[in-house]
Image (cartoon, rainbow, N blue to C red):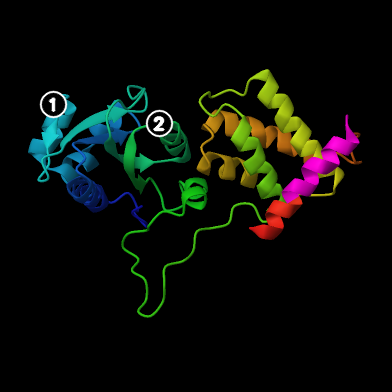
Amino acid sequence: MLSDTNQSPVHVLAGVKVADRLCETSGTLDVIFLVPAKASLTSGALHEALGATMHSKLVKGVPVTLPSGAQMRCETMKTLKWVSKPSVLIAIFAGQDMMDKIDSLQNLVAVVAVPWTPDAIENWNRTWSPQVLGKPTKSGKSAAPAIKLIADPIIEQAMKSLTSVINLGTAVLNASDDDHAKRILRILRSRNHQEPAENIKLWAIKNGWLPKAAERLETLAEKAFALRSKPKLENPAHAEQIYQRWAAAADSA
């Protein structure tokens, strides 16, 4: 991620250079230059950043050959439906809606984010703890560890259990998976566990959930943790067995 962009054209060109280096080191042959809309590409800022030749080709839909040999093409939020070949993606003027779309795509070798403003993709940053370019680590200090999205270890084990059994390939939870999520959340609430629902959504996205399914899990978590009293469980003995497995897994983690 390129931080503190202040919408500077310099950072756009830096993003292209980073993507080119990633292609060179990984052997990737395709780069996607993703902009919010066609109007973003025709703006003066990108013309200045990319130079007349590269900008003209992207506007016309002609791929640009980068120094690594990779081919870079332009897509918009509307035109990019899927990624068929391993690709490096550059997210230009990125906002959270763009990053949510990117999280739903497959075949991405790497993502270079150039946010619209420094805090425009804060949730994505929390989810993935990306390398922030332009902020070198001070001598003698190691890089900051990845952010722990779920503080409660038992809730995290419960979410791992749920993730292992649901269908991660669909954007919408099917009825069975939805019910399973509700049961797990009710067990957690019955034992007085609490966690901000947004944290659970971000954890889910990082662990393979598609964004829409993760949003549904967030909604279910909000409802479960907002219950004023402990919910009644359908099979208390079985629920207790499940809970003890989570607790044991949390202790050994």
- The residue drawn where x is 67% and y is 25% is 177
Q: Position of residue 242 (x, y in %)?
A: 78, 41
Q: Position of residue 35 (x, y in %)?
A: 31, 34
Q: Residue furthest top?
A: 175
As for residue 239 lying within the magenta part, the answer is yes
Query: Please, what secondary structure does the residue beneath circle 2 have?
Result: loop
Q: Earlier in the sequence, mark 1 or mark 2?
A: 1
- Where is mark 1, residue-wise? 62
Would you identify the image quadrant in which residue 83 lies? Answer: top left
Secondary structure mainly formed by the magenta segment: helix
Q: Is residue 39 visible?
A: yes
Residue 223: image tag: none
Residue 204 horizontal side relative to residue 88, left or right = right
As for residue 118 lying within the magenta part, the answer is no
Q: What range of the chain is rendered magenta?
A: 233-246
Residue 105: image tag: 2
Query: Label 1 sits on what residue type?
Result: Val
Return the residue nearer the eye: 167 or 31: 167
Query: Please, what secondary structure does the residue beneath circle 1 have?
Result: loop
Return the residue nearer the eye: 194 or 232: 232
- The residue drawn where x is 31% and y is 41% is 109
